[in-house]
Amino acid sequence: MAAIISVSTVAELGQAIRERRQVLGLRQAEAAMQSGVSAATFSAIENGKETARIGLVLQICRDLGLQITLRA
C-alpha cells in the first residue's frame, strides 16, 4: 500500500518530491531531465521556492509516480 503524506506548505511538497526522487535512486539532474525541466528549476521546487509554476510541479509529481489528492 502506498504511503499517504500530508503536505500543507510548498516546502513540505518540495521535501516529499525530494524523498521520492531519492527512493527511486535518481540524481536531481536525472529527474529534471526526465521531467523536461532544468536542474535549477528542479532544485528550486525541491527547496520549496514559491515561484515554481504549478504545472511543472504536477508534471514532476507524475514523472516520479506521485499522486496528489485534495480533501476538504
Image (tube, rainbow, N blue to C red):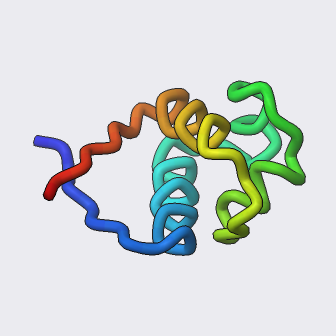
Residue 40 location in percent, x, y? 89, 53
Which quarter of the figure has residue 56?
top right
Residue appearing at x 53%, y 37% in the figure: 58
Task: Tell which of 68 and 3 is nearer to you.
Answer: 68
Residue appearing at x 62%, y 35% in the figure: 55
Which quarter of the figure has residue 59?
top right
Residue sitting at the far front: 72
Residue appearing at x 65%, y 62% in the figure: 46
- Image quarter in which the N terminus is found: top left
Task: Tell which of 40 and 53 is nearer to you.
Answer: 53
Residue 49 location in percent, x, y? 72, 68
Residue 2 location in percent, x, y? 18, 44
Q: In this view, does 4 lie to the left or right of 56?
A: left
Residue 45 location in percent, x, y? 69, 58
Q: Is residue 53 left or right of residue 19?
A: right
Q: Is residue 63 left or right of residue 49?
A: left
Q: How many labels does the image show?
A: 0
43 lies above or below 9: above
Task: Tell which of 56 and 2 is nearer to you.
Answer: 56
Residue appearing at x 25%, y 49% in the figure: 70
- Image quarter in which the C terminus is found: bottom left
Which quarter of the figure has residue 54?
top right
Task: Tell which of 62 and 69 is nearer to you.
Answer: 69
